[in-house]
Amino acid sequence: MNLAELSPGALAAACGVFGLCVGSFLNVAIYRFPKEELTVWRPTRSFCPGCRRQLEWSENIPVLSWLVQGGRCRGCKGRISVRYPLVELLTGFAWAALGWITPSEDWPMLLVRLLVTTALIVATFVDFDCYEIPDEISIGGMLVAPLVSLAVPELHRDTYLAHWVAEGGEPGRGAALVASLGGIAVGAGVLLAIGWLGEKLMGKEAMGLGDVKLLGAAGGFIGPGGALVALVIASMVGAVVGIANIGRFYCLLRSRVGARSAATSRARSLEIAKACGQMLPFGPYLALGTLAVLLYWNLLVFWF
Ligand SMILES: [Zn+2]
């Protein structure tokens, strides 16, 4: 069977099923990456974080195991977070969608898109959990991106820098490599510059190094212009979510004040809400911006 001859529906279904299983592995990666004593590969079998019991194969079936067991461990009956099946569903859905929108004869691009999307899902959830992005993803991405660009130069067929190097022709491996390295430099460079400026102006650390490395890695796949657009999208979405989050904390505080009839001023409530609501990781929004650019660059260029 030839991959290039699969219909979009068959390709999407195959990708979706495979994605569900990959999602199951991502849960392990998300849980283990931030923990010093664990690696993704060791121990090889997954275990229940509650009772440390090794899981049977029948407890590792994506989504289904969680549903059958009613969201509880078979041994200790401890709750298993609904996030486990959700990450599996999200990964399965993302893989199916990528299989659907990428023409099957473009399978090298499909592989790159699957790789980048999968890495971004891990970065997003680890960042949500502990406000850091694993170096395996960010530094790993910066190392892998130039190699992938060499292998799949089509990745940079819409990158200005690649076209400029190729002098208007179809970008080859050399041009794609230059675009990738330029993307890493611009992606990491712009966030370093913003962080430096923020520190000078506000006197506190304004940008996490994890975000710098993540946008560097992203730039390696989407080029310098792509990295800048991804940052703009991330900032816009991040600002909206940030304001909504501050609003949520403010409403929560005011309802408490109402209940206790305490005399906390509105200004003081807003101050506390700002302090709490601003504690948002930036990685998930960078991931979202990167994905938007990776998939819909031409549409975005039109808008911007
Ligand atoms: Zn257990």
Image (spheres, grey):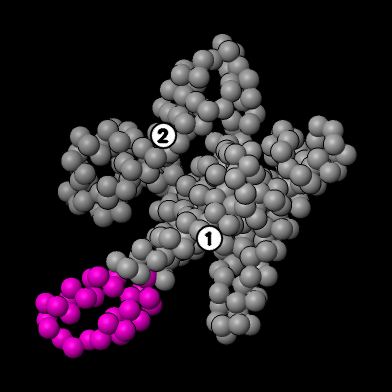
- What x and y, as percent, mark residue 236? 51, 58
Residue 161 is marked as: none
Residue at 18 percent of width and 88 percent of height: 263
**Quadrant position of residue 17:** top left
Closer to the camera, 92 or 103? 103
Q: Tag 1's secondary structure?
A: helix
Q: Is residue 164 above or below residue 242?
A: above
Q: Is residue 34 visible?
A: no
- What x and y, as percent, mark residue 272? 33, 80
| Residue 59 placement, left or right of 295 | left
- What x and y, as percent, mark residue 298? 64, 38
Closer to the camera, 68 or 284? 284
Q: What secondary structure do most residues of the magenta stretch adopt?
A: helix
Q: Is residue 258 magenta?
A: yes
Mark 2 belongs to which amino acid?
Phe
**Quadrant position of residue 187:** bottom right
Marks 1 and 2: in contact by CB < 8 Å?
A: no
Q: Residues within 10 Å of mark 1 (few under 14, many from 20)?
A: some
The magenta-colored residue range is 249-277
| Residue 225 placement, left or right of 293 | right
Closer to the camera, 214 or 79? 214
Q: Tag 2's secondary structure?
A: helix
Q: Is residue 92 above or below residue 193?
A: above
Q: Which residue is mark 1?
A: 235
Which residue of the protein is positioned furthest toward the front in this rendering? 303
Residue at 62 percent of width and 25 percent of height: 107
Closer to the camera, 135 or 191? 191
How far apart in space, not on screen, are marks 2 and 1 (Cα)?
Answer: 25 Å
Mark 1 belongs to which amino acid?
Ser
- What x and y, as percent, mark residue 8? 50, 19
Q: Earlier in the sequence, mark 2 or mark 1?
A: 2
Which residue of the protein is positioned furthest toward the right in this rendering? 167
